[in-house]
Amino acid sequence: MAAKWRWPVDNGTGGNARRLYSKPERQAALMHMRRVLDEGGTVARAATELRIPKHTLYCWREVAEGRRKPKRRGRSARPGWKPVSIVATAMPAAVTSPGIVVLGPRGLRMEGLTVASIAELVRALD
């Protein structure tokens, strides 16, 4: 049983690779852990034999016992994130020029200024 389990050690990600295990795989791992515990072993030993982190086994056990909700993967699992739809709209017939554009330090961009407001801005910056 333990020989077929392999937690990726390194696949070019610096050792932080993760694999999603199916429900039957998680159940098989928990059965192996229970056998090890029944023989007087530890969760750490079972995790070492399966080559997965012991924390993972603890989490799977808590989910199986109903003491923890299963993790949801993907962006939709992040609190505050909501799915959005992107809808294409027709472009306006003519794009108008924003008028005078003044570029300042550190990415400052001012659009739609009149000649009088530019003169006032230059005086204020002197």
Image: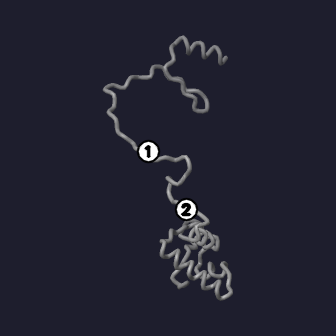
Q: CB atoms at circles 2 and 1 under 8 Å apart?
A: no
Name the amino acid, label 2: Lys
- The one of 113 and 20 positioned closer to us in this rendering: 20
Element marked by disc 1: loop
- The one of 56 and 93 positioned closer to us in this rendering: 56
The mark lying in front, picked from 2 and 1, is 2
- The one of 49 and 28 positioned closer to us in this rendering: 28
Check disc 1 and report the residue beneath it: 84
Name the amino acid, label 1: Val
Coordinates of residue 68 in the picture (x, y in percent): 60, 64
Question: Callout 2 environment at 10 Å: few (<14), some (14 to 19), or many (20+)?
Answer: few
State the CA–CA distance, disc 2 to disc 1.
22 Å
Element marked by disc 2: loop
Coordinates of residue 101 in the picture (x, y in percent): 50, 23
Residue for point 64% across, 74% down: 54
Check disc 2 and report the residue beneath it: 71
Question: Callout 1 environment at 10 Å: few (<14), some (14 to 19), or many (20+)?
Answer: few
Residue for point 40% across, 44% down: 85
Specify the farthest residue to the front.
Answer: 66
Figure check: 37 above or below 113: below
- The one of 33 and 45 positioned closer to us in this rendering: 33
